[in-house]
Amino acid sequence: MKILSIWAVLVLVSLSACGQRKKDKEAVRQEDPAHPGWNKLTPEEERVIVNKGTEYPGTGKYLHNTQKGTYTCKRCGAPLYRSEAKFESECGWPSFDDEIKGAVKRFPDPDGMRTEIRCAKCGAHLGHVFLNEGFTPKNTRHCVNSISMNFIPDKK
């Protein structure tokens, strides 16, 4: 009887966890009531986008994406980068050598060592920009967190 009770509790806990995951995914598709037009963020997205965190290197879903299309801001949907500007820098994050004109703003980090990049429309933290590294003829590398973006493939 005791084993049956433990088993029943485990089943209920696992079903409850599955329901929570579904709610979290649905929350991403909802608007943020405090900011109409902005997407509601998961706690991990908020950690990076709002609190200027970073995702672990090599873990982003767009790191190795080679499809043609447009990368947009996860929070407000503004177009940020075209796939033609993406290149492999082997830094662990998606890299772009150019943004869509007017889409990204640059701000000096408080440490004075790096330059933060944010969405020009909503101020979402995207990552950092580095200059004069020689990866591309434009000599610019936008090092962007995948979690800060969505991707819209070009229509064929």
Image (tube, rainbow, N blue to C red):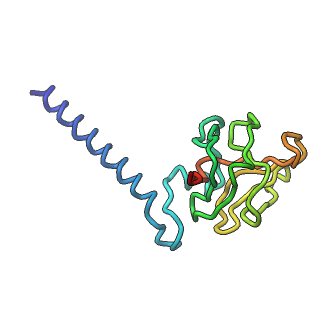
Would residue 65 be seen by someone viewing this image from the given angle? yes
Who is closer to the viewer here, 108 or 85?
85
Q: Is residue 31 left or right of residue 2?
A: right
Q: Residue 89's image quarter?
A: top right
Who is closer to the viewer here, 55 or 150?
150
Q: Is residue 23 left or right of residue 58?
A: left
Residue displayed at 30% across by 48% down? 19
Q: Position of residue 1 (x, y in %)?
A: 9, 27
Q: Position of residue 62 (x, y in %)?
A: 61, 43
Would residue 150 be seen by someone viewing this image from the given angle? no
Q: Residue 51's image quarter?
A: bottom right
Q: Is residue 77 left or right of residue 143?
A: left
Q: Is residue 132 left or right of residue 129?
A: right
Q: Residue furthest front?
A: 156
Q: Residue furthest left?
A: 1
Whether residue 102 is situated above or below residue 57 in the rendered picture: below
Residue displayed at 85% across by 53% down? 112
Who is closer to the viewer here, 156 or 132?
156
Residue displayed at 51% across by 63% down? 39
The number of discs equals 0
Q: Position of residue 43 (x, y in %)?
A: 50, 53
Residue displayed at 72% across by 49% down? 84
Who is closer to the viewer here, 10 or 101?
101
Q: Position of residue 126 (x, y in %)?
A: 68, 54
